[in-house]
Image (spheres, coloured by chain):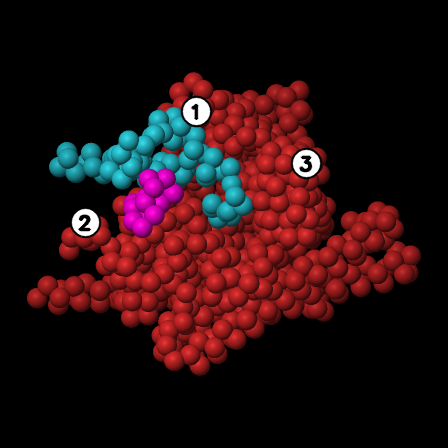
Chain colours: A red, B cyan
Amino acid sequence: MNRLSSKMGWLALALLGAFAFGYIGLQRGESISAIWIVIAAVCVYLIAYRFYSLYISDKVLGLDATRMTPAYKYNDGLDYVPTNKNVLFGHHFAAIAGAGPLVGPVLAAQMGYLPGMLWILAGVVFAGAVQDLMVLFISTRRDGRSLGDLIKSELGTVPGVIALFGTFMIMVIILAVLALIVVKALAESPWGTFTVAVTIPIALFMGVYTRYIRPGRIGEISLIGFVLLMLAIVGGQYVQEHPVLGAMFTFTGKELTWMLIGYGFIASVLPVWLLLAPRDYLSTFLKIGTIVGLALGIVFVAPELKMPAFTQFMDGSGPVWSGSLFPFLFITIACGAVSGFHALIASGTTPKLLENERHARFIGYGAMLMESFVAIMALIAASCIEPGVYFAMNSPAALIGTTVDTAAHAVSQWGFYVTPEMLAQVAKDVGEHSIISRAGGAPTLAVGMAHILSSIGGGKVMMAFWYHFAILFEALFILTAVDAGTRAGRFMLQDLLGTFVPSMRKIDSLPASLIATALCVAGWGYFLYQGVVDPLGGINTLWPLFGISNQMLAGIALILATCVLFKMKRDRFAWVTIVPTVWILICTLTAGWQKIFDANPRVGFLTHASKYQAALADGKLLAPAKSVAQMQQIIFNDYLDAGLAAFFILVLLSILGFGIKTVLAARAASKPSTSETPFEALPASALPST
Amino acid sequence: MLEELSKAGRYLGQTMRLMVGLPEYGTYVTHMENTHPGEPMMSYEEFFKERQEARYGGNGRVGRCC
C-alpha cells in the first residue's frame, strides 16, 4: 500500500512537471509567470534525484554504506572529520555556488529564456550533477586526493601535468573575466564604487577583531560586518549626491582596471586573516542569504517573464555575445549546467568530510541540482526586465552608441520596444547616471533582483538600495575570488616553474612568491585590460574563452570518470559518463574551432586579426585603435586569444587520447585495474543505524 | 519540539561555520581526548588560527568555485 501511494505520488509529480513544460511551450507571444519555470525545474530535479541519481549510486557505482571513508580512516578533527550530511551539503554548496551560475544565464537570455532553461535542466541532470557525484566518489575511494593526483594515478603522469597547466590557464581567464564584471558594474558609478571600496576597511576591521579583540568569534563579527555593509550602501547614496565626494569616487573603466590590478597584488600578499578571511565570511553569508532571498522573492512575487521564449539572435547575430546557439549557448552557460571547476571542489575538502560513502549521492548530485536552481533564478531575474532594457544594458557601445537616444533607437530597430525615457527612468530608479552598455551580467541581474525584491519590500523607493545591494554582493564575492584565486594561481605557478627553476618552488621565499604573484596578476590583468578597452565590450571575447576553458575541465573530469568506470569493469554502465563526455567534447571543440577560424570577425579571432591587418596595410585605423601601435596591439591580442583557444583544444584532445588509451588497456585487462584504496569496513560504531 | 528546534539551530550554526572552513571545535576536542590522550591540544584560539591558515593560506588548492 505504502509503495503504491509513493508510486502515485511520483506519477503525479511527473504529470505536474509535464503540464508545466506544456504550459511554457504553448504560450507563444504571451508573457508567462516565472512560477511555471520554477515548477518545471523543481519537478525535473526531484525526479532526476529520486531515480537517476539512485540508479548511478546503486547500479553504476555501487556506493557501499559499510565501506571505510577517509573521514574515519584519517580522522584528525581538522581536515578529516566525519560530518553530518546536511551540514556537509551546506559546506559543499557554498563552495560550488559562485558568480558563474549567476552571470552565464543572464548572458544567455539574449536568445530568449527557453534555450537557456532547457540546457540548464538537461545539462545538470545528465552532465553536471553526474560529474560532481562521480568525482566525489572517485576521490573518496582514493583517500580524498585532488583532481590532478587522480588524473596522474588513473591516466598517467603526463596527462596529470597537462591538466595542471590547463587548470592554471583557467584560473587566469576566470580572474580576468570576473574582474571585468566588477569593472563594468562600477565604471562611472560613484555609489557602487564607494560601497565596494568601503568593504576593504570593513574587512580589515573584522580581521583585527577576529585575530586580537575577540579571537575566532565569526558569528558576531559577521553580523557587525553585515550592518556596516548596509550602512555603506546607504552612505553610497550620500556620496553619489555630494558634488565633491561624488567626483572623487567616479572612475573610468581603465582607472578601475589599474586599481583592481594593484588591489589583486597587495591583497594576495597580505596575511590571510587580515583581509581575505573576513571578506570571505561576509561574501559567503551574503551569498547564501541572497540566494535564499531571491528564491523566496521569485516564489512569492512570481514575476512575469517579459523576455520572449526565443529571440532572433539564436542565429548568432546577438549583440551581447556572438556565435550561434550551437555550440555557444552550451559554453556560455557553464556553471549551472555543468562546470569543470566543480571537479576541483569535489576532490578538495568535501571527500575528507564525507561520513558515509552513500552520502555522496545527496552531496555530489544534490548540491549540483541546487546550483542549477540558482542558474534558473538568474535566468528568471534577467527575463523579467523589459527586453528592450536588457539589450540596452548588455549591448556594447559600438552597436548602440552611448546616449539613451541612440541606444533606444538601435534596440527598437531590433524589434524590442524601448524609449529613451524608459532607459532614463530605469537609471533613475536604481540611482545610476546611466545603465547603457553595462554588459557582464551583474548590473542586469541587479536590476532584475531589484525589480523582484522591491516588490517584496520597499517598492520603488527601495529599488536603488536593492540594486546596489546586488552589485555589492557580486563585487564582494568576486573580489574575494580575485584575492583567493591569485593566491592559488601563485602556488600553482611556483609549483610549475619549480619544475624548471628549483628555487621558485620555495613558497616561503619572499622573492619567489613576489615574482610568482606578479606574474599571476600580470596574466589576468593583461586579459582584463584587453577586455575593458574592447569596443565590443570585452565579455564578447573573454566569456567564450572562460566557457571553453571551464567546459574543457569538465571534459577532462568526465573522461577521468569514464576511465574509472572501465577500470572498475563496469563497461555496460559507462554510457552514463560517455554520453555527457561526447556532448561536452563536441560543444567545446566546435566552439574553440569557431573562435579561432570562423569567417565572421565578431566570432573568429583570426578573421578579426586579418581585418585589422588589411586596414593597416591600407593605412587606415579601425576603432578603438587611435594609432598604428594600437592597431598592432589589437592584432597581437587576437593571435594571443586564438592561441589560448588552441591551447585549450590541445589540452582536451591530448587528455582524450590518454583516456582512450586507458580505456583500451582496462578492457584488455581480465580483472578490475583501478587504483582505489582496498576495501576496509567502517568501524561498527560508524555504521548507519537503519 | 523545542529539542528538535535547538538541534536544527545547532546544525545551522555548524553549517555556517563549516561554509567558511571552520569545523566543530568540540569534535576536535573529543577526538583528541579519545585517540590521543595526554597529548598537547590546541586551544580554541589556536584551533581557529590553524584552520584559517589551512583554508586560506593555501597550498595552491582551490577552495571554491568561480
Q: Which residue is mark 3?
A: A511
Report the residue marked by disc 2.
Answer: A685
Dot placed on the residue nearer the N-terminal end, 2 or 1: 1
Where residue A285 appears, as percent x and y from the top left, is 40, 36
Q: Quadrant of the rendered structure where residue A438 is? A: top right
- Separation of residues labelled 3 and 1 (CA atoms): 29 Å
Which residue is under mark 1? A210
Of residues A126 and A412, the one drawn nearer to the viewer in this rendering:
A126
Disc count in the image? 3
Q: Earlier in the sequence, mark 3 or mark 1?
A: 1
- What kind of secondary structure does the magenta stretch mostly adopt? loop
Which x, y percent locates residue A601?
Answer: 73, 63
Q: Kindly tell me whether residue A302 is visible in this rendering.
A: no
Region of the chain picked out in magenta, as a range: A71-83
Residue A376 falls within the magenta-colored stretch: no
- Local packing at callout 2 (Cα closer than 10 Å; few below 14, some 14-19, many 20+) is few
Q: Is residue A329 above or below residue A71?
A: below
Q: Earlier in the sequence, mark 2 or mark 3?
A: 3
Q: Residue at x 29, y 46 (%)?
A: A82
